[in-house]
Amino acid sequence: MSTDRAHSPERFDPRAVDRPHPLLLRHYTIVAALTGPMFPIIWLHSYCRYATLRYRFDEEGVWMAWGVLFKREINLAYRRIQDIHVTRGLIQRWLGLASVAVQTAAGAATPEMTIEGVLDADGLRDFLYARMRGARDEQALPRDESGGDEVLELLAAIRDGVAGLRSRVERLEGAYGGPSGDSKA
Amino acid sequence: MSRAAERTTAWVYRGLWGVLVRWLRVPREQPGAPPGSGPVVRSVKPAPGFLRYLKFQFWLLLIVIDVVIIGVWAIIVVASPLAGIITAPLFWGVAIIPDIIAYAALHVRYDTTWYVITDRSVRIRRGVWIIREITITFENVQNVEVRQGPLQRHFGISNVVVQTAGGGATGPHGEGAGSHQGLLEGVENAGELRDLISARARASRGAGLGDEAGEPARRGFGPEHLAALRAISAEVR
């Protein structure tokens, strides 16, 4: 599925995603229909989830929320991701959907966050993978920040300041004849 | 097996794969490597011994179940030959048809299992009805386990389990979607894989909990800071 495509890290940008794709509702409807007599209850429950589901992907992490009566919000930092599961059921494959489950080190058996209704699941996985720990060289990270090293700049400024003060003191001492400052007072 | 039968089986199996790809949307090709992985990408399938191991289990189960079914039918034949003839298609159908399906499913299971190992991560895909893919970076690996039963030892295979932090129950085959582990089932070179993965995990300075490995080094003073401080102390002396 993803082998033939070029893997540029920013092939897909989920920051534009804030709601699940309408196909997710179709998936929920089919799954609810398969339960037979339970259809109205399951469908209503699924519909509420679909209608209130919101995503927000930012620089550091992802936020998701849903719920009508019982609201739930999840915040998750990309750096805390332990492993990424992409699950595709038969109906999901027919519709072109997938569930992207993201796990952190919290001790739950179920994934901390399951992102549904994103069409390019492989793209989303690559996006998350590129931001999780160990996907790149860790040494590469501090390098770009140490470019503007404030501590070193301050030290250099102090050094130059002290050097300037010293030369001025030496010049004054030369003008007033010798370092014996006490006798003049 | 004769040549013609072999060819027929291969043809039937190809047809089955055609159905899988076309109607069940099972991807035929291996999963792609994660982005930014190095040039060393290994795609490992379970060892051929794994297929033999599965087939051995299959034959064992088949003999037990079919002996019971055919035994019951034989009793009916002895008791009443007419009832035996009438119920023959039913009994033989129940005895044989699930076996053919199970045998094909076993091959399909073997052919849909993929492990992609790069220098940074491992990706596992398995499943036919529900296709599960899991990606773990070696940086997050907490421990690597190698498991081998006596039967697996006979076939020269083992299971390598890569575990990340976090608890949770595992499925019957350790493949529950919620489990914090990746299962490399039926691999031949388990020792090599274990060494590779645990070397990567040991080289990591973090605890594998999403902590920044580069953080302490960045806060401290580097050689250029020390040079500047020495210059200042020389000036004020």
Image (cartoon, rainbow, N blue to C red):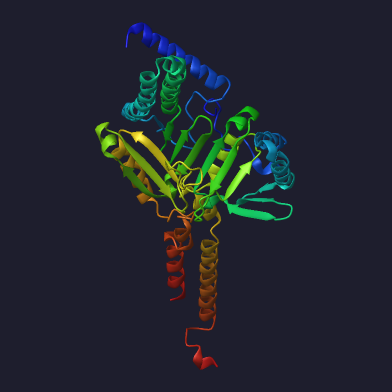
Q: Residue at x 52, y 64 (%)?
A: A151
Q: Nearer the viewer, residue B36 or B6?
A: B6
- Give residue B94's quadrant in the image: top left
Q: Is residue A120 above or below residue B16?
A: below
Q: Nearer the viewer, residue B176 or B187?
A: B176
Circle count: 0
Q: Is residue A178 above or below residue B118?
A: below
> Where does residue A110 sit, x and y in percent of width and height?
54, 49
> Where does residue B213 sit, x and y in percent of width and height?
45, 55
Image quarter (top left, top right, bottom left or bottom right) of the N terminus of chain B:
top left
> Where does residue A155 sit, x and y in percent of width and height?
51, 66
Whether residue B35 is visible: no
- Give residue B70's quadrant in the image: top left
Q: Is residue B54 above or below residue A151?
A: above
Q: Is residue A11 above or below residue B228?
A: above
Whether residue A109 is visible: yes
Image quarter (top left, top right, bottom left or bottom right) of the C terminus of chain B:
bottom left
Q: Residue furthest top?
A: B4
Q: Nearer the viewer, residue A143 or B178?
A: B178
Q: Residue at x 58, y 41 (%)?
A: A100
> Where does residue A4 sit, x and y in percent of width and height?
54, 25
